[in-house]
Image (cartoon, rainbow, N blue to C red):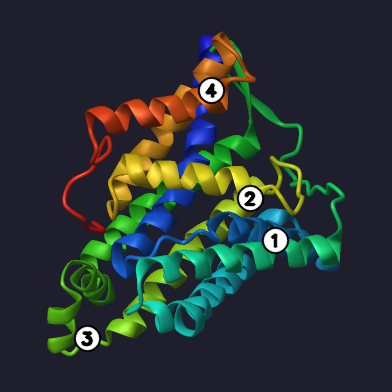
Amino acid sequence: MLVSALVSGIVLGAIYALIGAGLNLIFGVVRVINFAQGALLMLGVYVVYWTVTFTGVDPYLTLPVVVIVMALAGYLIQSSIINPVLKKERTSQLLITFGLGMFIENTVLAIMGPDVRSVHTFLRGKTLAIADARVSYESLVLVAVTVVCIISLFLYLNNTKLGTAIRAVSQQPDSAELAGINVKRIYGIAFGIGMAMTGVAAVLMAPLYDVNPSMGEAFGIMAFIVVVLGGLGNVQGAALAGLTLGVVQNLFATFVSFQLSLAFVFLFFILILLVRPQGLFGRALRVA
């Protein structure tokens, strides 16, 4: 049971890490808390479902489509909705992303209805034995791709010209603008990259979870916990916090109470903030 709980916790933590890393990149650069994260994740899963339904391809093959759609959506959201309120009070920014999330969720609900749907990959039903536990190949793919994405994002931010510009804007936007960097364009690119990460998470989650309009709510809330625990603006910290949170939640659900596992996560979150207000891995705001 311990091995099974740890493995399942790592899988859950990988999902939290991927979603949280994208959300933390957005906050680290744009300084906007994206309350629409859960709804956008759900929308990405539905893009997977619609692509599979209309083309018949394996869900994993939808990855390029979903990533491009989500990245473009992120860039457009930042350019057309977020930018106009960046200079306004924080309440306006929070409400506009919250309203966007409600709009997306209710629009999908109106179009698709509350029915639960599902997609299946060619790996469906195949498992691998790890000690005394059996893990689906779909879960292994999720963990492996998450590790690759987090490492790739870190390397991109630290070893490319655009990545350097993103880090410069995240640290000193005014100085970056004086140096000739188009700050608003960088905001859009950062938001697009964050949404691309969310799109990857959507593709990897689609075969493992039921597809419905409210599926993003819980993951959206957990993403915020991951961001705070990992340290605001710290992408690597968010990844580590996501992994930690997934393992802790699953261990509690396995050995104590499944029904109280989410309540325990929130209690764990509160206790950590009382001891370390900057989060488990928090330091000065940064994205790399």
Label of residue 216 in the image: 2
**156 or 12, which is in the foreground?**
12
Q: Earlier in the sequence, mark 2 or mark 3?
A: 3
Q: Earlier in the sequence, mark 1 or mark 4?
A: 1
Residue that numbered label 3 is attached to: 181
189 relative to 157 in the view: left or right: right
180 relative to 104 in the view: left or right: left
Location of residue 257 (image quadrant): top right
Picture residue at 40% right of the left edge, 25% below the top: 268
Q: Label 4 vs label 3: CA separation?
A: 44 Å
Q: Label 2 vs label 4: CA separation?
A: 19 Å
Q: Label 1 vs label 2: CA separation?
A: 9 Å
Residue 48 coordinates in the image, percent (x, y): 71, 60
Query: In the rendered view of the protein, which quadrant contains the N terminus?
Result: top right
Look at the numbered disc 4 and give the secondary structure of its residue: helix
In this view, the mark in front (1 or 4):
1
Label of residue 105 in the image: 1
Q: Are marks 3 and 1 in contact (CB under 8 Å)?
A: no
Residue that numbered label 4 is attached to: 250
Q: Is residue 230 above or below residue 163?
A: above
18 relative to 107 in the view: left or right: left
Location of residue 105 (image quadrant): bottom right
Residue type at mark 2: give it. Gly
In this view, the mark in front (2 or 3):
2
Q: Earlier in the sequence, mark 4 or mark 3?
A: 3
